[in-house]
Image: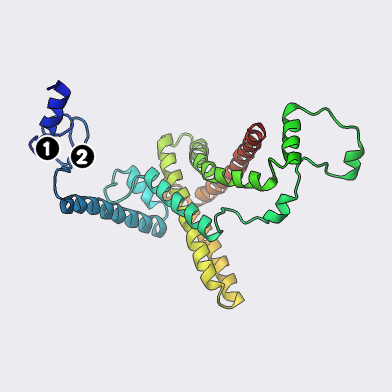
Amino acid sequence: MSSSTSRDVDATSASPHVCQNCGAALHGPYCSHCGQHDIDYHRSFHHVAHDLLENVFHFEGKFFSSVALLLAKPGQLTREFIAGRRQSQLNPLRFYLFVSVLFFLVVTFLNHGHLVNVDEQALIHLDPTAPASASASAKAPAPRDNFDARLERKFKSGELNAVQIVHELEHRVPTLFFLGVPLFALLLRLLYLGSGRYYVEHLIFSLHLHTWAFLASLLGDGYGQLFALGPRWLAGGFRFAFGVWLVAYLLASFHTVYRQSWKKSALKAAAATLAYAFSLAFVAAGLALATVFWLALD
């Protein structure tokens, strides 16, 4: 019998106090040598299912406690994580990924398979390569580069249309927001130069803020649809109150995390938001151009 086979047999018959992966002595649920979780699958389905459900509910408990703290106390989730009190909350990246996937699934479902509502019939007849006006078409044609000629040929032949471009751009929206997380953290790093904080701390705050934005959008849309069933003044009042809450939450988050005066927190929150909006628009334009370029060359 080969040494590898012997090692496999030894691992499956090892004592529960020995890691099945590397053979090191176990002093807890995780191996201190290789990090593997000590789960024995050589058991009945009942025991394995019990372990899986325990892990699921452990995640569920952390998820709901993280959501509650994130929504109820602006900035406190970030402070707790940076301070090392992380046992009752989800990892910020895992939290962001889970909520963002949930957000895009819900939005796509509500919009019948699309992230953005568009008039596809109008887009079908739209030709982005057509001249803007009759006077423009009367002018002498300028030299066309290879990309423009290829794009125009694809539109004329029907291989490509505006609907396809919009659908491809929809697929880039999650990427855009994911890129926005480190971008916003970089802006925070620049705003708080000299504060002694590391970039990772700003990144954690950025992850939590983006997660909150997704949750707030879901809550706002859900309650908005509910209030829309009542009188118009009630729906308008909700929109106003919700907008005030968004601004107040953002301000309170900056104040809680960075421990500066309310005035400084307001100025920096406004500066970060404006800079982020312009920066994200620039990144979005770059992604859009790259998408169109890829479609033209495909």
Q: Check contact, mark 2 vs mark 1: CB within 8 A.
A: no
| The N terminus sits in image quarter | top left
Instruction: Give the residue drawn at x 13%, y 35%.
Output: 12
- Residue 248 visible within the image: no
Decide: is 22 above or below 179: above
Question: Secondary structure beneath disc 1?
Answer: loop
- Residue 105 visible within the image: yes
Residue 75 spot, x, y in % from top left: 41, 51
The residue labelled by disc 2 is: 37
User: Which is more toward the observer, 287 or 124?
Assistant: 124
Decide: is 284 above or below 145: below
Instruction: Give the residue drawn at x 71%, y 51%.
Output: 123
Disc 2 residue type?
A: His
- Inter-mark Cα distance, 2 to 1: 12 Å
- Corner quadrant of residue 130: top right
Instruction: Give the residue drawn at x 36%, y 59%.
Output: 68
Residue 249 spot, x, y in % from top left: 48, 56
| For marks 2 and 1 on the same chain, the one whose residue lies earlier in the sequence | 1
Q: Residues within 10 Å of mark 1 (few under 14, many from 20)?
A: few
User: Which is more toward the observer, 79 or 228?
Assistant: 228
The residue labelled by disc 1 is: 27
Residue 181 spot, x, y in % from top left: 49, 41
Q: Is residue 213 left or right of residue 235?
A: left
